[in-house]
Image (spheres, grey):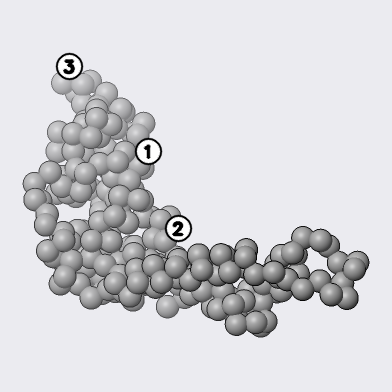
Amino acid sequence: MSENNGSNRASELITLKYIGAKTAAVLQSASIAAADITTKAVSFRMLVDAGVNPGVAAKIRREYSLSWSFSSGDDLTRRSTQVRGLGADEAAWVAASAGDWAKETDANATTPKSTTGQADAPQTPWASTVDRSVDAETDGSGDSFAAEAAWRNRSRPTPLTTLESISQSDADILAEAGIISVRSLATANAERVADVLELDRETVQLWHTEARESHNV
């Protein structure tokens, strides 16, 4: 009877995404059932401690929105000061850029455009400006506003969630360490980040590798 129960538990585990026969056997030996995962009764750390491959555990955690740990008691804000990231600079860049964009938008909306000698041109006052800006954003040419817009477009930080292996909750955790973009993750020390945030090293290394490949570092 117990063998049948064990077989049923293994079968239930295999029906879950990212869990194959080998992982199911590991979970079963640790008395972790499918319901424990679907009801979020286990954490990423518990899966790894049970013997699940960290990469597989990371995928399971993301798919079922599991907690990283139930006993970490993390003070991420305090530990984030130990990691050198690009967070502060990039945050300042975003804030400054947002202000500049708002000023530029207001200026373009209120500054009259001369239509002398342009009887056949569209009556929309911003039509020619839009065309020049589009070209300038592509090649960086044009007036100073367009050139600056092109630079901003090329320099804009790429969100971490654009990486396949990183969910929003993952990005939130990394942000506490000042890592808020693909670039900052690609240039960070993966082992140091893992140690400071008390995350699995193999998982952070997986993120780091994907970031480097995405950013061509």
- Pointers 3 and 1 in contact (C-beta within 8 Å): no
Q: Secondary structure at mark 1?
A: loop
- Pointers 1 and 2 in contact (C-beta within 8 Å): no
Label 1: few (<14), some or many (≥20) within 10 Å? few
Q: Amino acid at mark 1?
A: Lys
Q: Is residue 166 left or right of residue 105?
A: left
Task: Say which residue appears at 55% left-offset and 78% top-offset.
Answer: 148
> Label 1 vs label 2: CA separation?
21 Å
Q: Secondary structure at mark 3?
A: loop
Q: Position of residue 133 (x, y in %)?
A: 67, 72
Query: Which residue occupies the foreground of this view, 181 or 124?
Result: 124
Query: Which residue occupies the foreground of this view, 66 or 174?
Result: 174
Residue at image mark 1: 17
Q: Is residue 49 left or right of residue 61?
A: left
Residue at image mark 3: 1
> Label 2 vs label 3: CA separation?
48 Å
Q: Which mark is residue 162?
A: 2
Q: Is residue 90 left or right of residue 132?
A: left
Task: Say which residue appears at 62% left-offset and 65% top-offset.
Answer: 110
Q: Earlier in the sequence, mark 2 or mark 3?
A: 3
Query: Can residue 207 be seen from the camera position used here?
Result: yes
